[in-house]
Amino acid sequence: MNLFRTSFIALAASLLAATPHQLSAQDTSTHAILIDGEDWKEAVTGQTFTDGLCATEDGSLLFTDVRVGKGIYKLGLDGKVTMLIDEQPGISGLALGPEGRIFACQNKASRVVVFEKDGTVKELIKDVKPNDLIVTKKGYVYFTETGTKRIHGIAPDGKTFVADEGHVLRPNGITLSADQTTLAVSEHGGKHVWSWQIQPDGTLTGGAPNMTMLVSPNNAKGEALGDGSTTDAAGRYYVTTESGIQVFDATGRHSGTIALPFQGAKIVSVEFAGPNHEWLFVCAGDKIFKRKTQTQGAWLGK
């Protein structure tokens, strides 16, 4: 008997059994998400490499321009773009935490920081190469470090720890289940989205590749190029890939793929924002696109 295989299957089964929103397992397509006649529309133009999408409570959208941007930009509900935080370049990931604090991955500066509401910047960890991050309502920060195959954790008291190492092939996008009991991370160098149960002390257990992304026939390496990810209120997971935004129900079953904004688009970050968090936004190079949906994002920055 292959004990590793038996243990792996048991872990996967227990994790999926504990996943919330079981009813959404009936959603086997994107028909419950997309609206007939609604297509992608340009929301932001004139940037260089947009990334780091993050929604605020009122539906405004925060984003960065990784290559030449000077800080954090805000797309308001009025459609206007303003500079929210200046002189903080090289941010690849953003997340809103408790009390409206903004957490950021500064890959070029090799650190993770938090922007306090009074304008001060606090360094949470240095000498790392963070890619993307998420923050729970309890104040735990998790971020991916693609080159080391690590998922790091930062406790509310500032203590840092390695939550997982060596399992995820080039970990990239990271998100939470709608009830914040599950952490999900996409592989940029493989075809899986891994998930773990978050324990009360912030540690992760039961890690397994519970979602399988479809690979473009044009990818000779067999990589789906999973990147940014987000979650909706029905428990679905959304992951940007080479072939489009792939959607999974709460049990990990593939529900469909939302088409790219245009042929050949290189999409990275994805997020729900706008009025009632009903608009799906995606970064594609120098632009950000949006389309209205029938669902709502699971706004996690509480």
Image (cartoon, rainbow, N blue to C red):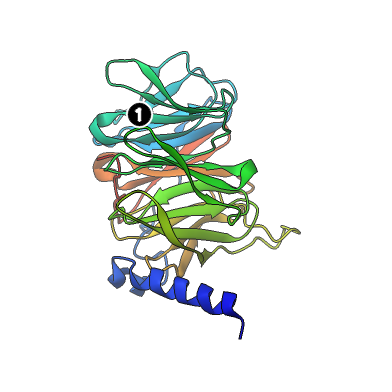
The percent position of residue 91, horizontal first and vertical second, equals: 51, 27
Residue at 74% from the left image edge and 58% from the top image edge: 221
* Residue closest to the eye, 241 or 260: 241
Give the image location of residue 137, x and y in percent: 27, 43
From the top left corner, tell me how far across and down residue 156 is, in percent.
32, 36
Q: Quadrant of the C terminus?
A: top left
The residue pinned by badge 1 equals: 102
- Callout 1 crowding tier (Cα within 10 Å): few <14, some 14–19, many ≥20: many
Res. 234 image quadrant:
bottom left
Q: Judge whether residue 83 can be spotted in this image.
A: no
Residue 13 located left or right of residue 89: left
Q: Is residue 275 above or below residue 203?
A: above
Residue drawn at x 46%, y 71% is: 12
From the viewer's side, name the closer residue of 233 and 162: 162
Q: Residue at x 60, y 61 (%)?
A: 191
Callout 1: helix, strand or loop?
A: strand
Residue at 43% in and 14% down? 86
Residue 147 appearing in the image: yes
Q: In x, y percent, where is residue 15?
A: 40, 68
